Image (tube, helix red, strand yellow):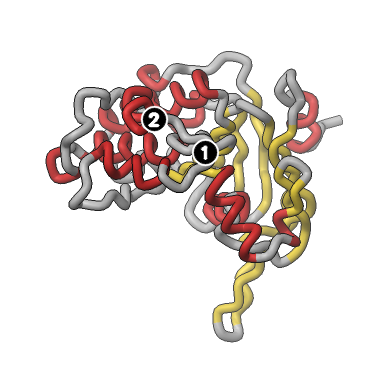
Amino acid sequence: MSRSPIERQIESSPIDGKIVFKIKGLTKVYGMGEIMVHALRGVDLDFYSSELVVLLGPSGSGKSTLLNILGGLDTATSGQVTYRERDLTRANEHDLTEYRRFHVGFVFQFYNLIPSLTALENVAVVTEIATHPMKPEDALKIVGLGERLHHFPAQLSGGEQQRVAIARAIAKNPEVLLCDEPTGALDLATGVVVLEALERVNRELGTTTVIITHNSGIADMADRVVHLSNGLISEVVQHTVKKRPGELQW
């Protein structure tokens, strides 16, 4: 008898078993005039400490909605999301702001750097409000920009700007790094360099990393690949052998 994707996911969960996120029956419905859009239709999923997960699916599959709820940027219609036993679905705006500030790093498709600040200063903006930050220059070294500290965004390539954005996200030492199409605006060669930076952060810092993409070529670098379709999980694949970013093709 065939087994469901969720059953396969449980069987192949990471060895340490330390759950960072537990999601049960998660739904999200948006009202657009008289039309109700069901972005998530009852998702059950766990995310584990130090793993790298790719959420894969076409536009409209629910990837970004799921990521935004995990990051405290959006709220669920029903169901439950817990982070380290903290119920995010019952948290008020003050609690969600604190959660975003101290526990989660975000990387988006567009870099959102401040043009008038250097790479070092863009990262320092975050470390100044964090409780246990790393040094901005150390964060930039991790993503391979130790020699570009004093360059402004206009003096950096697109891939370098994205790596500054990654350094900014990890400089506050978050347990979770949420990445929304981080290579979407980049060519293959540049995208690989950015993915190498994310892989290094995950490997060296143990940051639970979630990358959403519609690009199936990226999936081979993940510990797990969660396929979404029409607001539902269609399949969960566990990789026993992962590819390094330099081996990826898309």
Q: Quadrant of residue 181?
A: top left
Residue at (67%, 46%) from the top-left corner?
233
| In-front residue for pair 37/94 | 94
- Residue 70 at what x, y percent from top left? 62, 50
Which quadrant does the N terminus fall into?
Answer: top right
Which quadrant does the C terminus fall into?
Answer: top left
Of the residues shown, which amino acid type is indicated by label 1?
Leu
- Residue 226 at what x, y percent from top left? 62, 38
Q: Which mark is residue 177?
A: 1
Residue at (67%, 51%) from the top-left corner?
232
Q: Quadrant of residue 41?
A: bottom right
**Vertical relation: 167 (above or below) 110:** above
Residue 164 visible in rendering:
yes
Secondary-structure class at tag 2: loop
Q: Is 213 left, or right, of 104 in this rendering?
A: left
Query: Which badge, 2 or 1, comes first in the chain's sequence?
Result: 2
Residue 229 visible in rendering:
no
The crowd level at tag 2 (other Cα within 10 Å; few <14, some 14-19, many 20+) is: some
The residue pinned by badge 2 equals 135
| In-front residue for pair 234/20 | 20
Q: Is 4 left, or right, of 232 in this rendering?
A: right
| Labels in figure, total | 2
